[in-house]
Image (cartoon, helix red, strand yellow):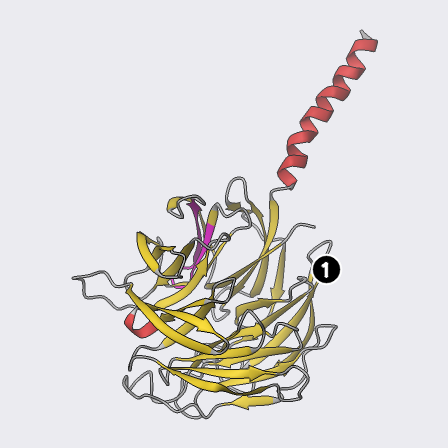
């Protein structure tokens, strides 16, 4: 009896351990930014299971910081940079930017330092390809002094230095007297080849293209073709490049459209515009975030306002879009969203209904499926998954 029982017990223990080991391979940490004028305290680190598509009910870590509404990660995931928005309901009187270190083994997040953004309502940031500089978009709700693009040096240890360059002479279209009385820089992204930085200015109805030289103290200079004029009153928000850098998609927030461009060496050529609005329905709209699937075959775009929808587009060989689905976000104001590392789930930050909603994704068709989780979370705004190592 004893001779047979012990091996059997060992075998059972080994078999029971296998699912746990397999399960751990599907676990990811995800960092979640938020607005802190309510119950939220800053950045949260949660466990996400890419088998079930669910976040744990309780966070693994809470990092207290003011209004970390946008998260930017270094390529090696050792450092996290966040904008700290000031503005209505906020405790800070000025915009700031914070740096955090991420332990590569435990994913524990610890503060490095914080600097002023030299503008109001910093709402977006992006790193240069060489990671020497962080480009911060100061949206600035009030028309005076208006929005700006700030350039912040980044040390090899993730430490931020004071702003070394500010671009704020962008003008304003004033088509919408409330929202376009001055410049409102909503995002600034680096081109895939690292040669240019492109700022989307909602207030000016323009893209501003800068040449980038990381060897210079002030690395940005107007490019040979420095301005891309957009339809009056359209309000450009976020720009996304294809992986090969030959196409780009831009959300036009105020008219709920996506502009499609051919791109080459600092020049943009508009070739398509697609409408996100529900035809025949009078609704407030607001084109927001946009992301492609990992294989680059599908584009997901948020339309906020009263529509609160995701639109799914198939991307053809030339980067043009064909709508294949509309789906409600099951909440209000999808501030941002992210596909999980498996590509089978989408996490949605429904800011004004205070929930993170997770829905299934079919990687083959691109279609959004059933909802798998609704997690109460005060004012979520952005996500970043951390890779398993």
Q: List the residue tagged with mark 1.
A: 103
Residue 93 in sight here? no
Residue at left 43%, top 45%?
Answer: 360
Main SS type for the magenta part?
strand
Q: Quadrant of residue 372?
A: top left
Find residue 34 and report its horizontal and vertical position in percent: 51, 65
Residue 263 appears left or right of 217? left
- Which residue is at the front of the view, 170 or 221? 221
Q: Position of residue 249 (x, y in %)?
A: 41, 67
- Asked if 184 appears above or below 10 in the picture, the reply is below
Quadrant of the image containing the N terminus: top right
Which range is magenta?
346-361
* Occupied quadrant, residue 311: bottom left
Q: Where is residue 341 in the image (x, y as percent from the top left)?
A: 55, 50
Q: Vertical placement of 287 versus 347: above or below?
A: below
Please identify the residue farthest to the left as the structure is shown. Answer: 280
Q: Please provide percent x and percent y for residue 6.
A: 80, 16
Taking the view exactly as shown, the residue that stands out farthest to the top is 1
- What kind of element bears circle 1? loop
Residue 274 or 271: which is nearer the viewer?
271
Count up the numbered dots.
Answer: 1
Would residue 222 be visible to someone looking at this image? yes
In the image, what residue occupies the spot 37% across and 85% down? 204
Q: Identify which residue, 105 or 316, lies in the foreground.
A: 316
For residue 67: magenta?
no
């Amino acid at each position: 009896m004893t001779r047979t029982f012990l091996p059997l017990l060992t075998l059972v223990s080994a078999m029971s351990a296998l699912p746990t080991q397999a399960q751990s391979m599907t676990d990811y940490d995800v960092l979640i930014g938020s607005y802190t004028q309510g119950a939220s305290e800053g950045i949260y680190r949660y466990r996400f299971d890419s088998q079930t598509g669910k976040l744990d009910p309780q966070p693994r870590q809470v990092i207290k910081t003011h209004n970390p509404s946008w998260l930017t990660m270094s390529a090696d995931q050792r450092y996290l940079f966040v904008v700290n928005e000031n503005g209505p309901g906020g405790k800070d009187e000025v915009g700031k930017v914070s740096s955090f270190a991420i332990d590569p083994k435990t994913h524990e997040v610890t503060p490095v330092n914080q600097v002023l953004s030299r503008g109001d309502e910093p709402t977006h940031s992006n790193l240069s390809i060489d990671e020497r500089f962080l480009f911060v978009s100061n949206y600035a709700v009030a028309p005076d002094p208006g929005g700006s693009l700030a350039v912040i040096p980044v040390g090899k240890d993730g430490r931020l230095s004071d702003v070394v360059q500010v671009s704020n002479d962008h003008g304003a279209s004033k088509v919408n007297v409330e929202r376009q009385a001055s410049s409102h820089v909503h995002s600034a992204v680096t081109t895939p080849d690292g040669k240019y930085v492109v700022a989307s200015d909602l207030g000016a109805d323009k893209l501003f293209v800068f040449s980038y030289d990381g060897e210079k103290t002030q690395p940005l200079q107007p490019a040979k073709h420095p301005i891309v004029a957009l339809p009056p009153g359209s309000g450009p928000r976020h720009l996304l490049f294809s992986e090969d850098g030959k196409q780009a998609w831009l959300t036009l927030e105020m008219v709920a459209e996506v502009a499609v461009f051919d791109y080459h060496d600092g020049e943009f050529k508009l070739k398509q515009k697609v409408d996100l609005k529900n035809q025949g329905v009078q609704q407030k709209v607001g084109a927001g975030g946009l992301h492609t699937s990992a294989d680059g075959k599908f584009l997901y775009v948020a339309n906020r306002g009263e529509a609160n929808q995701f639109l799914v587009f198939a991307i053809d060989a030339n980067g043009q879009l064909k709508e294949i689905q509309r789906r409600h976000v099951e909440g209000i104001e999808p501030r941002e969203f992210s596909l999980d590392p498996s590509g089978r789930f989408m996490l949605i930050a429904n800011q004004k209904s205070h929930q993170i909603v997770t829905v299934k994704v079919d990687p083959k068709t691109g279609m959004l499926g059933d909802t798998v989780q609704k997690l109460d979370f005060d004012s979520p705004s952005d996500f970043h998954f951390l890779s398993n190592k």
